C-alpha cells in the first residue's frame, strides 16, 4: 500500500505541475516515511500512523490525509477540501477519482513498471531505479 500512496503523490505532482517531462524521485526510509522530490525542488513527505492513516505534507504547506477501508479502498482529503478515492481491481489495475470528476487509471506490467493515464490523456510512467527509488516521468 505504501507504493500505492507514493505513486498517488507522484501522479498528483505530475498532473498539478502540468510538466510531464519533469522527473520525480521517491524514497522510503527505515521508519516507513516517504520523501518525494521533483526537478523543481518541490518536496512531499508522507508518514503512516499505527492505524494505517497516511499524512502527506508538501513544501508549500499543503496537507493530504488518507485512510483505507476494510475493502482496500483509499480516500484522500486535502487541506483545500478536495477528495480523491482510489480502488484496485482483482487484476491490479488502480482507478483514482477526484471530487472534480477527474479519473486517473494505473496499471503495472510484469516488470514492475507502472503507467498512469488521466482523463485528459496525460501519461506518467514509473519504475524503480537501481537504488530502489521510485522514479516517474
Image (tube, rainbow, N blue to C red):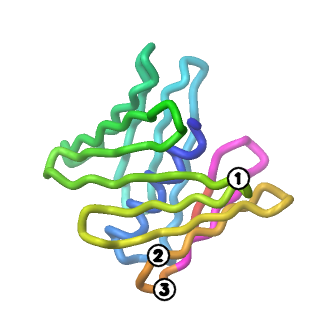
Left or right of 135, for residue 12:
left
Q: Are marks 3 and 2 in contact (CB under 8 Å)?
A: yes
Residue 50 drawn at (x, y percent):
45, 13
Instruction: Provide residue 101's location: percent of width, then percent of height.
Output: 30, 72
Q: CA distance from mark 3 to mark 2?
A: 5 Å
Please state if 7 lies on the left or on the right of 50 as rendered: right
What's the residue at 84%, 58% (across, down)? 111
The C terminus is located in which quarter? Answer: bottom right
Q: Which residue is mark 3?
A: 121
User: Who is closer to the viewer here, 8 or 84?
Assistant: 84
Please provide percent x and percent y for residue 95.
Answer: 52, 62
Horizontal placement of 41 versus 111: left or right? left
Residue segment shown in magenta: 123-134
Residue located 65% across and 45% down the image:
133
**Residue depth check, mark 2 versus mark 1: number of the one nearer the observer:** 1
Is the residue marked by circle 2 packed among few (<14), some (14-19), or many (20+) residues within 10 Å?
some
The answer to which of marks 2 and 1 sits earlier in the sequence is 1
Amino acid at each position: 500500500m505504501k507504493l500505492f500512496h507514493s505513486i498517488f503523490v507522484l501522479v498528483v505532482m505530475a498532473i498539478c505541475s502540468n510538466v510531464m517531462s519533469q522527473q520525480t524521485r521517491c524514497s522510503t526510509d527505515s521508519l516507513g516515511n516517504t520523501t518525494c522530490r521533483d526537478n523543481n525542488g518541490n518536496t512531499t513527505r508522507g508518514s503512516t500512523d499505527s492505524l494505517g492513516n497516511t499524512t502527506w505534507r508538501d513544501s508549500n504547506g499543503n496537507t493530504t490525509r488518507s485512510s483505507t477501508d476494510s475493502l482496500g479502498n483509499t480516500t484522500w482529503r486535502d487541506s483545500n477540501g478536495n477528495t480523491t478515492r482510489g480502488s484496485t481491481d482483482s487484476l491490479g489495475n488502480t482507478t483514482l477519482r477526484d471530487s472534480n470528476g477527474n479519473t486517473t487509471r494505473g496499471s503495472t506490467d510484469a516488470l514492475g513498471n507502472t503507467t498512469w493515464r488521466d482523463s485528459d490523456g496525460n501519461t506518467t510512467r514509473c519504475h524503480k531505479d537501481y537504488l530502489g527509488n521510485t522514479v516517474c516521468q
